[in-house]
Amino acid sequence: MHSTLKLTVSHAPFWHNGSSISSKSRNILLASLLAVIPGCYQYGSAAVGVVTLSIASAILWELLINFISRRPISVGDGNAALIGMMFAMMLPATTPWWAVVTGTFFAVVIGKEIFGGIGANPFNPAVLAMTILMLSWGDLFDFNAALLNYQFDFNSVYPLVLSKSFGAPAVESLPLMDLLQGKQIGGIGSTFGIGLILGGVYLMLRGVIRWEISISFLAGIFAAALCFNILNPELYAGPGFHLLTGYTLIGAFFLATEDSSSPVNFIPMLIYGLLGGALTVLIRNIGTHIDGVLYAILIINLVNPIVDKIRPKALGKGV
Amino acid sequence: MIKRSFFGLVKPKLQYEIIDEAQAEPVSIKTSKQIMLYIDQSVDPSLENAGENAGNVLLKTGDQVKTGQKIAMTDDAADYLLSSQSGQISKISTFVGIMGKNYTSVTIDVDGESSQNVDEGFKNVCQAPSLENAREFLTGLPGQPDFNVFFDSEKPVKAIVVLGVDDDLLSTTNQYFVKNNIIAIKTGVDLLCKITGISNAILIVPQHLEQVAGSSGAVVKTVDSEYPSAHPELIMRHILASEDGESKSKSGIAFFSAEAVCAIGAAYNTGKLFLEKLVTFVSKDGNKQLVSVPIGTPLQDILNEFNETLNDGDRVILGGPMQGISVFSADYPVLPDTDTIIIQDKNQITERSDIACINCGECVRVCPANIQVNQLIRFLEAGQYEEAADQNDLFSCIECGFCSYVCESRIPVFQHIKLAKHTLESMKAAEESNA
Ligand code: SF4
Ligand code: SF4
């Protein structure tokens, strides 16, 4: 019995499917590049600057918190970088550096770390930060003003402002194909529809994000926009327009699907997504805000714990 | 190791091992110089020296044992093993195993005359099969048949279920018996029915063995090939649900492995106890081989047979990859319930982490018991076991280990669950003994 051999002893199971948080973050970052690279192409080096600063500062904030709270360094899992990337994707390319750094502070520190770090945040950190910034410095995120100095070969008015101020006929001139190809102004990584959709499909197929949420979010937008459109086609733009403008696509594939703040059961996921989509259109069409995606996502984040209670009974309990 | 597939959209699937059409015959492992038996109980070590004075201790160092002799520490003990060899007891010690269980380890130096030196105890009673003498002599057979369920007057047994399926991955032991020995299973089942007076016996087999099993004339049901559908708890709930409707949870069901049933049948027919365990041995390079080993053989002997060497950091697993246990030393013996032995190289081991749950929900989607593991783990990590049991269905868990297998944070979820159950159960036991 006195062998010197030291075997590894641990609890079952002895297999693991190989998934990890870092590979999840890597995959989402990779998919987001499909939208971010065309965005950078469109807006030039300023956009590259915003994206890199955002990612770098997000990582540094998390590092700082790790340091202050004397917890193991957690930036290796890529989650901070991911938050930085998500945040940058929503920003206009002209965002000043201090706004980017403040934003990632809100996202990483207020949005995630003070709740206890990864997995404990009730809201999507990037969305929370973006909303705080929009409420504090609204002018920075008025896309029309922010991107005034750019020359585009397409109509350079933020499409959602058009529809809000002038009704549906004003946006009829915008061909959906153009919107899909990113021929609209907006956040760095939020306008290139094809890239976002490809990235989203990739993530859904690989099981990195839950397809139920993305699909039902889009379905919610489609259904709600269609209802409005049928009721008053003069005033409200059609579903195609809503699906391809503002933060809809990035919201459906990258923001609403954030793990910690979304449900995990099948029916709750559908409710969560549908509700998010419907709220988005409601806010856009009736509310005072220009885009509703961010608020809608915060609201569904809030109801997530409640809807996620709808679930099958555990084995041996009840029928 | 089965990894997540590239397309992770669908629920992850783990397929049970399917026994090969051209299955190689099991390799017989030679009788070793020593065998070791771990008996699930403990005797006060001070009694060991007390020798004859302590009247209830049956065995002591230096005693001769015969092949097939019952090895129990006290004469009223329900737990015993059967010695697969004859020889002399060289050492008796106690140790504490997984989850605080006490074991007595009995080492027997084999004298090489096992075939002549046979214990006659069972032979004397085998002409008159009964539940009592089955419990008295046969619990130590390979597959570890449990006869105690028939003696529980509060929970009368309504059905005997013979598992021709293997509960954990990689194992093919029970399938082997269904495939090659269906007649012996039938004999064993008939015998069990006779001594218990229960006529309702069901044979559970994987789909690919349905035809073979059907030829025996027994009542056959199939389970599908995805883990953990062959788990006894799920078999009870899903397959037998139609059998007796609502009362299913209250009525007792006696589970026997196909291997045990064969051994029981053979024991009564021949008067001899068959004490070789059929084990699937999985080497570091993933090769699987059925081996037939005398119960009590130390793992080292099997490793030697296959020229497998162990290095620091390797892992030796008794049982399957999902539910087995890993052991500290290659001296650990093959026991009646050891279906699989897996050797993992150091670099095949995925490290577990202490990162918090990220709420990805993978565990929830695979859990066969519909437990909200993402919620449960938060309570378990905080040590709030009672809340976990009350609000988060801790005791619905059937201990399949699937949640740990898929966990993206690599949390040892299953270990937390086992620890919580163990803690609550020992608290309850302590309360009862104080009351
Ligand atoms: S071990 Fe995990 S997956 Fe299996 S039943 Fe228990 S909680 Fe569910
Ligand atoms: S698989 Fe792990 S990380 Fe994911 S929800 Fe379950 S316990 Fe949490």
Image: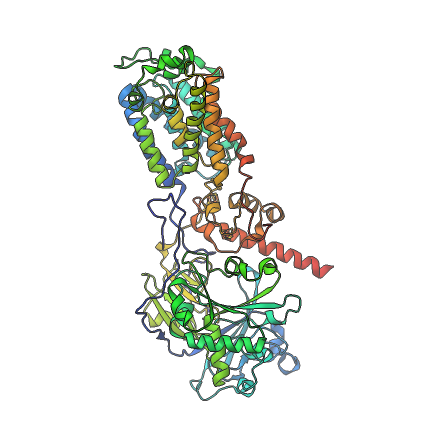
Q: Nearer the viewer, residue A104 or A91?
A: A91
**Outermost residue, right direction?**
B435
In the displayed structure image, the side of residue B359 where residue A43 appears, left or right: left
List x then y, in percent, for residue B19: 36, 66
Can residue B343 be seen in this snapshot? yes
Does B14 sit above or below residue A264? below
Does B31 sit above or below residue A147? below
The coloring applied to the image is: rainbow
Can residue A118 be seen in this snapshot? no
In the displayed structure image, the side of residue A270 where residue B41 appears, left or right: right
List x then y, in percent, for residue A315: 55, 52
Does A266 sit above or below residue A51? below
List x then y, in percent, for residue B386: 63, 48
Looking at the rendering, which quadrant does residue A80 occupy?
A: top left
In the displayed structure image, the side of residue B324 where residue B422 appears, left or right: right
Does B65 sit above or below residue A182? below
Q: Quadrant of the C terminus of chain B?
A: bottom right
Number of on-image labels? 0
Question: Residue at horizontal 30%, vertical 69%?
Answer: B22
Q: Nearer the viewer, residue B317 or B146?
A: B146
Q: Nearer the viewer, residue B181 or A191?
A: B181
List x then y, in percent, for residue B163: 47, 67
Q: Quadrant of the N terminus of chain B?
A: bottom left
Question: Residue at horizontal 56%, vertical 47%?
Answer: A313
